[in-house]
Structures are given as structure tokens and as C-alpha cells.
Image (cartoon, rainbow, N blue to C red):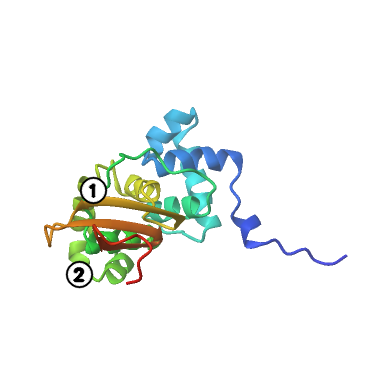
Amino acid sequence: MPVKIPTAEALTRLTPAEKRVAERLVAGASNVRGASDLKMSTRTFAGHVASIGRKFQITSRTGRPARAHAVLASKQVTPPPAPASLPDFTPQDLRLLRALARQPETHDIARAAGIALADVRPQIADLVAKAGADNETHLVGLGHAWGLLGTSTQRVYSMRSPSRRARVRWVATGSACTARAADEPVGAAR
């Protein structure tokens, strides 16, 4: 009998219990709160979070935002509800958000965001506050809800650019987000 090698999709498929835990994870729930919401022990909840991490090869203890990004990018859970208006994110904010979502370790976040290691945690805290998120993991969930992280749909947000004080539209497509002049059509070449 030939050996059947499972696909990557099959290897990362969440169990029903892991999906319920992942839904609480992307909403920013702590192990204690998530376990309480799901009426399970904290140890069981934490075990499911660890299992989710192993499935996506995220074994860092600090990798909750990366775990949330992985389950959201795999489309196995939906993003949490988010405010209709997008915060005034700068291009540096968006680079930091993407780094937080994709990198489980602080030094890797610093490198990917192009900022000093000592500035990572304070800048993430500022970004969490700017987004109105409960914590870093919830921030990643909101990033997906707004279409800023790994989604295939295109969303257009209008806001004032903090640096230019001009009206701009942020166009989020895939994992990219670019600023366009307010009168520039969304499909215009750059």
C-alpha cells in the first residue's frame, strides 16, 4: 500500500475545539477569559492555543498575534467585529502591524518593521491604543477585519494623512496597503 502524505492544508486544519479557541484568540481573549467563555479549564484552553501554534509552526510563547494571523489567513475563523472607520495608520504603523502578525519574536518584529528593538513594545502599545484594540492579538484580528492583513478583498478607506494633512484613500489589497490621492481612481496605475 502506498504511503499517503497529507497536504499542508490537512496538516493545519483545526479541530472543532481548536476553532472555538481560535475564535476567542483572534478576539484578543486571554487564556483565562477564553477558557471561561468556552466553559473549559485554562489548561485545556492553553493546550489548544499551543496545538494551533504547532500546526502553523509557531512555537514561541510570545506568538499569540502570529497564531491569530495564521488562523485568520487560513480562513478557518472569521475576524472579530471591527469599527467601521479605519484609524489613521501611517505607512510605518502598517509595516509594524504586518511584522507583528507575521513574526512571533520581538527581535524579528523589530527587523521586519525596521525599528530599534527597544522601540518595538512601546510602538506596538501605541498602535494597540490607536486601533482601540484590547491587546496585540486583538489588533491583528482587527487588521484582518479591516482588510489590512492577508485578505483577498479590496477595501477603500478615506482619512486624513497625518503627515500631509491632505485627504487620502488607503487601499487595502492582499497584504499591501497604499495611500492614494482622494481624487485618484482606485484602479489607477501608480
- Reply above or below: 33 against 102: above
Residue with the mark numbered 1: 87
Badge 2, how many Cα within 10 Å: few under 14, some, many 20+? Answer: few
Count of labels in the image: 2
- Reply above or below: 25 against 161: above
Residue at 35% across, 46% down: 142
- Please, which residue is most extreme toward the right here? 1
Q: Position of residue 137 (x, y in %)?
A: 35, 48
* Foreground residue among 145 and 156: 156
Q: Position of residue 63 (x, y in %)?
A: 39, 55
Badge 1, how many Cα within 10 Å: few under 14, some, many 20+? Answer: some
Residue with the mark numbered 2: 116
SS assignment at label 1: loop
* Foreground residue among 49 and 8: 8
Query: From the image, which quarter does the N terminus lie in?
Result: bottom right
Left or right: residue 22 versus residue 110 is: right
Left or right: residue 162 versus residue 102 is: left
* Foreground residue among 59 and 67: 67
Of callouts 2 and 1, which one flags the residue occurring earlier in the amino acid sequence? Answer: 1
Q: Position of residue 24 (x, y in %)?
A: 44, 38
Dots 2, 1 in contact, CB < 8 A: no
Residue at 46% across, 59% down: 59
Hey, what amino acid is under mark 2? Ala
